[in-house]
Amino acid sequence: MQQSHSYCPECGNTIALVEFEQTYMLKCSTCKAEYYFDPKVSAVCALISDNQVLLIKRGNEPGYGKWSLPGGYVDRSEKVEDAVIREIREETGLRIEDITLLGVYSSTGSPVIVIAYLTRASSGHITPNHEVLECGFFDLNTLPELAFPRDEEIIRLAAVS
């Protein structure tokens, strides 16, 4: 793991990367201040209409060229529901409403926590942005190869909700 800071924000002395309970943190050797690496939160949505789900073809890693649910990272101090609204509008051009929590997903070894929502489009036309190669609706029974295994689970849960 690469260290991102060299000096303690509290006292200005050198800090070091140390292993702590199967994870890592930065620790100041002088004032003993501890700085943890927080997880990254991502919000995705399953937009289902007429037995089809909206997917995006990813234009960046991880999963470049594979299909996934639209969504992205939540910005610091941003409400998660606002993040999913923003991400969907940025990636697909659609405005969404009726946002319902489906579940929270995480896995050992990954710093990303995914919060999944079920939603429906309220307005707009599908217009992919620079991060998306394509957007399209797919029949729930014939999904393309997905970038993330959890997406299929989210889609199946959304289909019965």
Image (cartoon, rainbow, N blue to C red):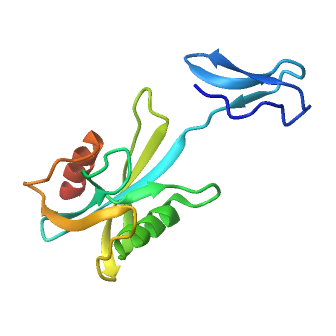
Q: Position of residue 46 (x, y in %)?
A: 29, 60
Q: Position of residue 86 (x, y in %)?
A: 48, 69
Q: Position of residue 51 (x, y in %)?
A: 12, 65
Q: To which quarter of the image does residue 124 belong?
A: bottom left
Horizontal side of residue 1 vs 95, given as left or right: right
User: Considering the image in quadrants, where does the C terminus appear?
Assistant: bottom left
Tell me what residue is drawn at x 25 percent, y 40 percent: 149
Tell me what residue is drawn at x 31 percent, y 46 percent: 63
Q: Position of residue 23 (x, y in %)?
A: 57, 22
Tell me what residue is drawn at x 18 percent, y 67 percent: 137
User: Considering the image in quadrants, where does the N terminus appear?
Assistant: top right
Q: To which quarter of the image does residue 43 belong?
A: bottom left
Q: Nearer the viewer, residue 20 or 145?
A: 145
Horizontal side of residue 33 vs 23, given as left or right: right
Q: Nearer the viewer, residue 5 or 50?
A: 5
Residue at the far right: name it: 11
Q: To which quarter of the image does residue 109 belong?
A: top left
Q: Is residue 33 above or below residue 38?
A: above
Tell me what residue is drawn at x 20 percent, y 67 percent: 136
Residue 101 appears in view? no
Residue 38 appears in view? yes
Q: Is residue 2 above or below residue 22?
A: below
Q: Is residue 150 above or below residue 67?
A: above
